[in-house]
Image (cartoon, rainbow, N blue to C red):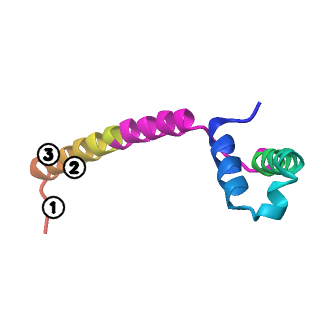
Amino acid sequence: MASPDIEQLVERVMAALPDGVKEMKQEADQQLRAALQRTLSQMDLVTREEFDIQREVLLRTRSKLEALEQQVAALEQTLQQSHPPTE
């Protein structure tokens, strides 16, 4: 079953075809759908839902990294204050 995005794309392409080709609409429609399905199935695509999930994971990871960087900076500052460099 074709996705709604493929359906919209097929409809747009079919509407743009010249009248002579539109007469063979059913065959052209089937061929176009098959070609689009083959091409899209060969691509390394993810769904919007998968993308959004990974985006959220990345945002959480970035937030944790920033917090850890702040902790390390605070620890380094504390260490420098308790053991000042000797000259």
Q: Amino acid at mark 1?
A: Pro
- Is 44 placed left or right of 71 in the picture? right
When the figure is inspected, residue 17 is found, relative to residue 42, above or below; the finding is below
Circles 1 and 2: CB atoms closer than 8 Å:
no
Is 8 contained in the magenta span? no
Number of callouts? 3
Residue 7, image x and y in percent? 68, 41
Q: Amino acid at mark 2?
A: Ala
Q: Secondary structure at mark 3?
A: helix
Q: Can you tell which of label 3 and label 2 is closer to the viewer?
A: 2
Q: Give the residue at the far top of this rendering.
A: 1
Q: Which residue is mark 1?
A: 85
Q: Which residue is mark 2?
A: 73
First in sequence: mark 1 vs mark 2:
2
Residue drawn 44% across the image and 41% down it? 58
Residue drawn 13% across the image and 69% down it? 87
Q: Quadrant of residue 70?
A: top left
What segment carries the magenta color? 41-62
Q: Can you tell which of label 3 and label 1 is closer to the viewer?
A: 3
Q: Quadrant of the N terminus?
A: top right
First in sequence: mark 3 vs mark 1:
3
Q: Which residue is mark 3?
A: 78
